[in-house]
Image (cartoon, rainbow, N blue to C red):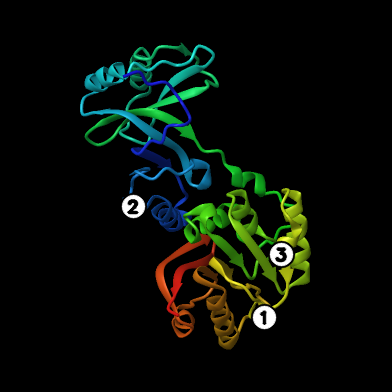
């Protein structure tokens, strides 16, 4: 069987390499679980799945390995690669990299393993900026080889918006939250009824998700509109108003409860917002800087997952909920 590198094939055996800071680990694991449909083993930097996800979707993913060959022995793996008769087109270049997130091996040994695998491929090798990268990885009891696709940190382009809140969600956290709320991506519609400067909106829109935003604060709306236009999105996707008066319905919502040291929301205000949210969407990710379990239960939301993200002494609680309507 001759295997040529081609973008149309749909691989079903995939290994995703990811990395996160300890303070964001719980959110990272929840996001990967939602995107890939499988639990994340602790103390492991990779995850195997049959789901094909663009690695750039997640702020925590580093690369996706599309498995072509697998064998318990390295020599057996080389024979398997040989049997695939991989041919890189004449106008393209390739290289083989040892993926360090598997079993650790010394640097010199990594280079030797890469070289031996590269010798099984017909084509022009190029160490710097090749067109195609093949990945080699040793798991606990097996060797794998495949096409490596690296993630582009799209969310980094959204860090320096014209307007930002110091207490707003970072673009990385906002992106992960969108994935938790809507792992299906563009198949679902979304709503952010307290959108602030639009961090969640921008991450969702950059993934092709249909979303609209709203906020009670005219300054936030002005900032959100400028931010949306800055990235080429429609400023009219955000409206000014009280979320309790909003009409319409979306498949999913993200509600980041307003946080301000000067004005704390009362229990009744929180309940009102959570009940309004239930009218706007059936599933939601709700974010707060204070405990909210009682309010969620009282307003008919069933908690599916709860994680925390910390930044210094500042902790955010994130709940994935379904409404029992």
Q: How busy is the neighbourhood of tag 3: few (under 14 within 10 Å), some, or many (20 plus)?
A: many
Picture quarter containing residue 306?
bottom left
Location of the C terminus (image quadrant): bottom left
Classify mark 2: residues with Cα within 10 Å, few (<14), some (14-19) or many (20+): some
Closer to us: mark 3 or mark 2?
3
Residue at the image point whose x is 44% and y is 12% from the top: 123
C-alpha distance separating marks 3 and 1: 14 Å
* Residue at the disc numbered 3: 238
Instruction: Find disc 1 in the rendering and name its residue.
Output: 245
Query: At x 36% / y 22%, what residue is drawn?
Result: 110
**In the rendered structure, which disc, 2 or 1, sits on the residue that comes first in sequence?**
2
In the figure, residue 210 lies in which quadrant? bottom right
Could you give the CA–CA distance between mark 3 and mark 2, rounded to whole angstroms? Answer: 35 Å
CA gap, disc 2 and disc 1: 38 Å
Q: Is residue 193 left or right of residue 274?
A: right
The residue shown at (54%, 13%) is 91
The quarter of the rendered structure image containing the N terminus is top left
Q: Which mark is residue 2?
A: none
Count the marks.
3
Relative placement, left or right, of 91 versus 116 is: right
Q: Position of residue 244 (x, y in %)?
A: 64, 81
Judging by the rendered image, the residue that carries numbered circle 2 is: 38
Near mark 1 (Cα within 10 A), the count class, few <14, some 14-19 or many ≥20, is few
Which of pointers 3 and 1 lies earlier in the amino acid sequence? 3
Q: Mark 3–mark 1 contact, CB under 8 Å?
A: no
Q: Is residue 167 visible?
A: no
Q: Earlier in the sequence, mark 3 or mark 2?
A: 2
Residue 18 image position (x, y, % from top left): 43, 43
Position of 49 compared to 169: left or right? Answer: left
Residue 205 versus residue 257 in the image, above or below: above
């Amino acid at each position: 069987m001759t295997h040529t590198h081609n973008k149309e094939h749909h691989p079903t055996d995939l290994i995703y390499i990811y990395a996160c800071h300890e303070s964001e680990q719980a959110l990272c694991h929840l996001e990967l679980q939602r995107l890939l449909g499988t639990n994340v083993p602790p103390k492991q930097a990779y995850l195997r799945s049959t789901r094909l996800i663009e690695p750039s979707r997640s702020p925590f993913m580093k690369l996706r390995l599309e498995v072509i060959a697998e064998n318990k022995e390295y020599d057996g793996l080389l024979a398997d690669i040989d049997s695939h008769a991989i041919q890189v087109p004449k106008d393209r270049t390739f290289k083989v990299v040892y993926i360090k997130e598997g079993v650790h091996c010394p640097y010199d040994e990594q280079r030797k393993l890469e070289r031996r695998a590269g010798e099984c491929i017909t084509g022009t090798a190029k160490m710097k900026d090749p067109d195609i990268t093949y990945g080699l990885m040793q798991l606990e009891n097996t060797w794998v080889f495949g096409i490596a696709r690296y993630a582009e940190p799209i969310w980094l382009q959204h860090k320096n918006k014209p307007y930002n809140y110091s207490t707003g969600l970072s673009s990385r956290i906002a992106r992960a939250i969108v994935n938790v709320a809507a792992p299906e991506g563009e198949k679902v519609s979304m709503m952010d009824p307290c959108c602030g400067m639009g961090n969640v909106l921008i991450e969702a829109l950059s993934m092709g998700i249909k979303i609209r935003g709203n906020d009670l604060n005219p300054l936030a709306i002005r900032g959100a509109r400028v931010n949306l236009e800055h990235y080429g999105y429609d400023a009219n996707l955000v409206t000014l108003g009280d979320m309790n008066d909003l009409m319409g319905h979306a498949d999913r919502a993200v509600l980041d409860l307003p946080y301000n040291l000067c004005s704390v929301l009362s229990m009744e205000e929180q309940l009102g917002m959570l009940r309004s949210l239930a009218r706007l969407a059936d599933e939601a990710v709700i974010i707060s800087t204070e405990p909210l379990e009682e309010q969620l239960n009282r307003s008919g939301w069933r908690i599916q997952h709860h994680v925390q993200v910390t930044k210094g002494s500042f902790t955010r609680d994130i709940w994935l909920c379904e409404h029992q309507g």
